[in-house]
Amino acid sequence: MQALSQLSYSPISNLSAFGRPTSTIAGKTTLSDHAKPSSQSTPDAPHPRQIAVPGRPSPARYAEPTMPPAPSPKTHYPNLVVFDHPLIQHKLTLMRDKTTGFMAFRSLMRQIAALMVFEVTRTFHAERIQVDTPLEQTTGSRINAQITVVPVLRAGLGMADAILEVMPEARVGHLGLARDEKTLKPISYLSKLPKHLNAGPVILVDPMLATGGSAVAALTMLREAGADDLRMIALVASPEGVTTLGEHHPDVKIYAAALDRGLDERGYIRPGLGDAGDRLYGTT
Ligand code: PRP
Ligand code: URA
């Protein structure tokens, strides 16, 4: 029986005949494979690179699920970690719902960010220290690096507040970027960053990674300002955005609650959750 840990989520080549993601065995597909789906595939035949798991129907023959399966945190994108935690997926589903109003949307975004932050900070360096409890001395640990959280305005603010509640000692930088609706290119209108960004890890925060243009620009600005230990928290990522970010900043790990199907002609993530900034602030 194939171990579950060897299964990975793949956004494009693993789409079933119904356009829903299915699972394949890790390592058998590559990014370039996704860009070039085989013209020989038929809706009934499994994709040539899909390997049937013993005891299960061929992935291409799965019935359409009522909901997309939760993505596994292990994907074949080396720069991406997707959270498949049921609590995060539950909250994200509420955020996707178009009937969710801005108050609930804002609250859910904060809740998800707070849940994600534990994993995002897992690799932060901590030093061993001695501490006196009321009863005796013991060994504890302390994160001694200077952490900087950088939300991309506007929507990034919705996640950054919750992250700062967990890490109140972090410094905050602000980057204002707005995507031009026609060209989809980011326009920078604000950059307020703390000095000495190389004093510790820098967390870029933006819920939507669509074309990747805004995130690439933000990370480039952070690098130019001195940051050398960078990671990004997003809520929903597209395969296009993850790929673009990987090409420009291959050392930056992206943490996201979902890797969606792709972009539409207006550059919106599908199925996505719409315009995050507008839904967050009630500007629709
Ligand atoms: C959204 C989002 C990202 C960007 C993602 O911001 O918060 O910053 O779009 O798109 P991209 O990956 O194609 O660049 P938007 O420009 O809509 O600004 P807003 O947060 O002020 O609404
Ligand atoms: N920005 C958003 O807020 N949503 C998208 O789907 C794409 C870009």
Image: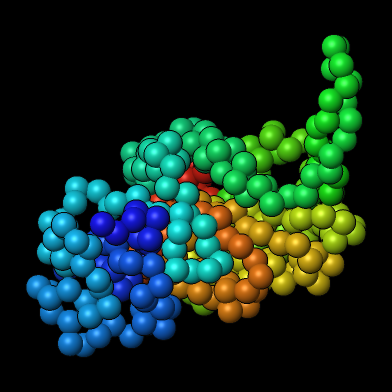
Name which quarter of the figure residue 2 lies in. Answer: bottom left
Residue at point 13% right, 79% down? 42
Left or right? Give the position of 159 relative to 81.
right
Q: How many marks?
A: 0
Left or right? Give the position of 5 relative to 210.
left
- Of residue 163 and residue 123, the one placed in the foreground of this image is 123
- Of residue 208 and residue 255, the one placed in the foreground of this image is 255
Residue at point 27% right, 78% down? 49
Quadrant of image for the N terminus: bottom left
Whether residue 259 can be seen here: yes
Residue 235 appears at what percent x and percent y? 50, 51
Determine the residue located farthest toward the top in the rendered image: 135
Residue at point 28% right, 82% down? 37
Left or right? Give the position of 224 relative to 249.
right
Left or right? Give the position of 73 relative to 141.
left
Residue 126 appears at what percent x and percent y? 79, 44
Name which quarter of the figure residue 23 lies in. Answer: bottom left
Residue at point 75% right, 62% down? 229
Name which quarter of the figure residue 158 lies in. Answer: top right
Type of colouring = rainbow
